[in-house]
Amino acid sequence: MSPVTVSRALAQLAAEGLVVTRPGAGAFRARPHTPQTPAGDTSWQQVALSADGSADVVPRTVDPWGVVVSLAAPPPGVLEFNGGYLHSSLQPERAMAAALARAGRRPGAWGRPPLEGLPELREWFARGIGGAVTAAEVLIAAGGQAALATALRALAPPGAPVLVESPTYPGMLALARAAGLRPVPVPVDPDGVRPDLLADAFHATGARVFVCQPLFQNPTGAVLAPDRRAEVLRIAREAGAFVVEDDFVRRLVHADAGPLPRPLAADDPDGVVVHVGSLTKATSPSFRVSALAARGPVLERLRAIQVVDSFFVPRPLQEAALELVGSPAWTRHLRALSAELKTRRDAMTGALARHLPELALPHIPSGGYHLWLRLPDGTDEAALTAAALRADVALAPGRPYFSAEPPAAHVRLSFAAVAGTGEIAEGVRRLRAACDEVLR
């Protein structure tokens, strides 16, 4: 065995409490564990956690299930069609490792960073947003989920309505409910959110926040149409409301996409848009570096909440982000990723057309990492999800993507979390068997 293998084995044994290591002496068997004391009675917590919400207009509930579906690793042998991140073969692991090593050697890399984030990194994010956005209007956050949580807490008090696309990202719905907010759905079609229904929703609810994903929307893959972009901003401005723009997959564009529209924040001089952008989707689930951009007094509130919640993003990670995006490897990675995502998307759409034509695919996206399928009328999506898992393929059921009653049964299939086109073909074959069991 190599020294690395021995070192890892000893570290694992030490973590399990089976051995102890003594510098300069060696590794020794640990003394036997003493019997554990009996577990206490925690049933009192059920009363404590619910009693304090009796006066809440909207009860605060924390339901992570819709998020865990795409975060938890499936059992061995199960193909991950439910994943929310790139497969390790698509991640720039060598470039990230090199960036982290260089970052650790930077002067002051382990010191306390500015609370708003490193100026150079804020400037990089500001350039990516474009328009008149400056580094002074950007805050560095610990991933898109944390940035969304900060934005929702800053913009809406507990009990308030918040307008959301329907369907939309389950993690955002979970954040809203955990903050005591009331998600109100606004339907999405292939051209993004419908402005007429958005205006109706603002008028009916008095909401002051609308959360949207204008580019490659999760889960539909829709892109907000050019004629709707200005209309959405106008409607929000007239309602005295903010638009939280979750620009989460701009760097997961497919090779055939063509020029991308600018972020909404780039065309917003009045501070309507609070922009969230992230590096995580294009790198690794553990590379949690994102940006919050806003203009006007709301920026100070966002900053205050973020400081209270988490102080700051660790400086070594910010330095590593700067090293990564400033290296030639970053451009090469994005170019290769763009081509590979198109190949995988085409492989999955082709396999579905051949083997599962009864599953409707209303929109083929030119960015992102997933497809949104409508199941035949009357299909029990929970039963299909369970049957697929028995066939060793994990799906993301559609129900968690709706804040109210869904209009039909859906599933979301990811083509980026598996090893390649071979696994995509095998996964669709297994899904055919599951559908034969449920749809007969």
Image (spheres, rainbow, N blue to C red):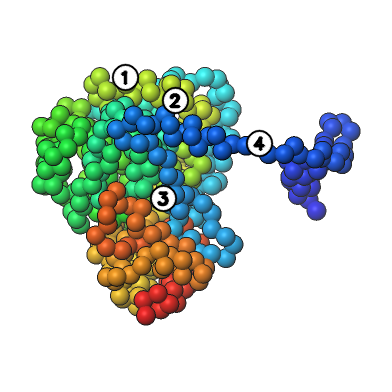
Q: Residue 166 at x, y = what percent? A: 25, 50
Q: Residue 93 at x, y = what percent? A: 54, 47
Q: Secondary structure at mark 3?
A: helix
Q: Residue, x 36% and y 67% (percent of image)?
A: 380
Q: Earlier in the sequence, mark 4 or mark 2?
A: 4
Closest to the camera, between mark 3 and mark 4, is 4
Q: Earlier in the sequence, mark 3 or mark 1?
A: 3
Q: Is the residue under label 2 in contact with that under label 4 (CB below 8 Å)?
A: no
Give residue 300's mark: 1
Amino acid, disc 1: Glu
Camera-nearest residue between 189 and 262: 189
Label 2 neighbourhood size at 10 Å, few (<14), some (14-19), many (20+)?
Answer: few
Residue at which label 4 appears: 40
Amino acid, disc 3: Gly
Q: Is residue 6 above or below residue 208?
A: below
Q: Distance of mark 1 from mark 4, alpha carbons? A: 44 Å
Q: Residue 396 at x, y = what percent? A: 41, 58
Closest to the camera, between mark 3 and mark 1, is 3
Amino acid, disc 4: Gly
Q: Is residue 382 above or below residue 227?
A: below
Q: Quadrant of residue 57?
A: top left
Residue at which label 3 appears: 66
Residue at which label 2 appears: 309
Q: Distance of mark 3 from mark 1, alpha carbons? A: 31 Å
Closest to the camera, between mark 1 and mark 4, is 4
Q: Earlier in the sequence, mark 3 or mark 4?
A: 4
Q: Is the residue under label 2 in contact with that under label 1 (CB below 8 Å)?
A: no
Q: Distance of mark 4 from mark 2, alpha carbons? A: 30 Å
